[in-house]
Image (tube, rainbow, N blue to C red):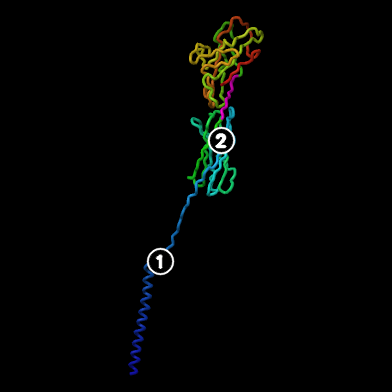
Amino acid sequence: MENKKRGASFIFGFLLFSILMISFVSADLSDFFSSITGRATSQNVGLNISIAGTPPNITMVIINAAPSITENGVTLVMLNFTVHDVDGFTNINGTNAKAQFNKTNEVTRQSNSTGCVGTANFSTDYANFTCSIAINYFDASGLWSVNVSAGDLSSTNVVNHTATFTLGQTSAFVSSPGNLTFATLSRGSSNQTSNNDPLLLNNTGNKNITAGNVQINATDLIGETNAVYGIWAANISVGVTTGSSGECDISGGLNNATSMNKSIFTSINQSRLLIGNHSANDGSTGQEQLYFCIRTIGTEIISQAYTTNTTQGPWTIKIV
C-alpha cells in the first residue's frame, strides 16, 4: 500500500510539472510570435511650419522744400520716408527702397543708381530712408506724384506709398550771338539780311513760351561818326524763317516777318520758345531761331558805321 501511494504521488507530480512546463512554453511562444509581427505601438512625426511675416507699410513721406528747377541746370530734390514693420526694422530690406517722380507726358525721374539710403532706425519697428532725385530745368511745372516703395526680407512684400508736390514755374532764356552784323551795304539798297543770324534763343526754364510771346524792343541804328544819320527801326523786320527773303516779307502771311517799332515791345509773328532739352541743338527742341532783314536803306545816309551801341542802346528781347 505504501508503494502504491508513492507511485500515485509521482504520477501527479509529473503531470503538474508537465502542465506548468507547457504553460510556460506556450507563453514564451506567444511573445515570440508577437515580436515578429512588426506591429508598432507608437510613432514619431516631425512638423515644419512657415509663418509669413507681416508686410511693412510706409507711414510718412516728406519733401524737404517745395522744389523748383535750376535755370539751365539740374536740381537735386531730397525726400525722406519712414517704413514701419511689426517684425522689426532689421526685417526691412533697404536695398529695394526707391523713389520716383511722375507726371503725365513727362519723363519719370527716379532715385539715383544707389537708390535710397537708410539714415536712421528708431524704436524697434521703424526705419528712415533718404532719397535724392534729379529734376531737370525742362521738367514741366505743376503737380507731380511721388511714389516711394520698400520691402522686407521677403521679396514679395513690397509696399508703395504715393504723395504729391507742385513744381514751380521758371521763365528764363539765353540768346546768342551777342551782336548781329550785316555785310557792307549800299545806299538805296533793300532786303539786306544779316550775315551772322539766326539769333538763337534757348529756353533755360520750364515755362512754354507760346506763339507770339517772344517780343523785341527795337532802337534805331545811329551813325557812329555822324549821329544825324541813321537806319530807322521801322525799316528792319524780324522773322522765324529764312530763304526766299522770308525775314524780309511783312505782307501778313502766316509765317511772314514782323516790322519793328522803335522803343516798343513788338511780338514776333509765330515766334515760340517751348520747353525742352536744348542740348539737342536742332533749332526747335527748347529753341527758337530769329532772322533779321533791313528792308530799306535810305539814299540820304552817308558812308559810316551804324550801330545800336551809341545813344539809343541795344535792342531788348523778352519772353512773356
The residue singled out by tag 2 in the image is 133
**Do the numbered discs 1 and 2 sit on residues whose CB atoms are within 8 Å?**
no
Q: Is residue 68 above or below residue 235?
A: below
Q: Quadrant of the C terminus?
A: top right
Q: Secondary structure at mark 2?
A: strand
Q: Position of residue 137 (x, y in %)?
A: 56, 29
Q: Estimate the spatial distance between the alpha carbons at disc 1 and disc 2, rounded to whole Å.
A: 69 Å
* Stretch of the chain drawn in magenta: 168-177
Of residues 159 and 296, the one drawn nearer to the viewer in this rendering = 159
Quarter-of-image position of residue 25? bottom left
Q: Secondary structure at mark 1?
A: loop
- Categorize mark 1 by other alpha carbons within 10 Å: few (<14), some (14-19), many (20+): few
Q: Outermost residue, top direction?
A: 300
Quarter-of-image position of residue 166? top right
Of residues 2 and 59, the one drawn nearer to the viewer in this rendering = 59
Q: Position of residue 125 (x, y in %)?
A: 55, 48
Residue at image location 36% in from the left, 73% down from the top: 30
The residue singled out by tag 1 in the image is 41
Of residues 103 and 135, the one drawn nearer to the viewer in this rendering = 103
Q: Position of residue 73 (x, y in %)?
A: 58, 29
Residue at image location 55% in from the left, 25% down from the top: 207
> In the image, what residue type sits under mark 1?
Thr
- Categorize mark 2 by other alpha carbons within 10 Å: few (<14), some (14-19), many (20+): many
